[in-house]
Image (cartoon, rainbow, N blue to C red):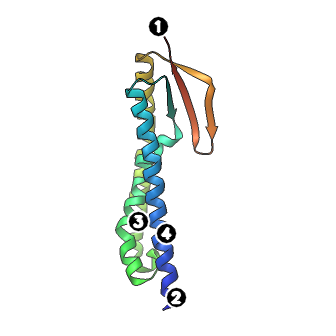
Amino acid sequence: MQRKISPRIACSLLLLIAIFLWSSITYVVVMDYMDLLNHLDKVQVSIITLWCPLGMLGAVFSLILMSPKAIYLGKGIGEVYSPKAMQLANKVTIYFALAGVAFAAGWTYHSIALLEKNGYMYSRDLTKITPTGIHLMYIKTTH
């Protein structure tokens, strides 16, 4: 019995961590965009972070769909599902990751166009480079 508790805990924690990370990063990206729509004085555009809302969604979906059975049986996901099912989950994850790159590029161009339209100017001094990406800061001009 003890042997089955460890995979259940590990799979549950993996699922919870993945959902928490995806939702918190997505929240930050949405709030940055809301700052732009609300015409705040300082607006942040996080280029690399924009990949996460769509890019991580495939992995989160795969975990949500595959984890319950693995948790119930007390085994790892790779032990529960066939290699063909695992291959399909990997393909879904890769396609979402590629779509996330396209989404990030398009959203960046869209955001920069809105920034220019609404009279924002890039601030090199306020821009931050962190482990989560490059966070470009724009300041509203007072024309």
Q: Which mark is residue 87?
A: none
**Crowding at mark 3 (Cα within 10 Å: few <14, some 14-19, many 20+):** many
User: Of marks 4 and 2, which one's residue comes earlier in the chain?
Assistant: 2
- CA distance separating discs 4 and 3: 11 Å
Residue type at tag 2 = Arg
Mark 2 and mark 3: Cα distance apart in space: 22 Å
Q: Are marks 1 and 4 in contact (CB under 8 Å)?
A: no
**Three-letter residue code for mark 3:** Leu
> Measuring 51% from the left and 36% from the top, which residue is drawn there?
47
**Residue 143 tag number:** 1
Splitting the image into 4 quarters, where does residue 109 fall?
A: top left
- Of pointers 4 and 3, the one earlier in the residue sequence: 4
The span from disc 1 to disc 3 (Cα, nearest Å) is 50 Å
The type of residue carrying mark 1 is: His
Q: Residue at x 50, y 14 (%)?
A: 141
- Residue 102 drawn at (x, y percent): 42, 40
The x, y position of residue 131, in whole percent, is 62, 45
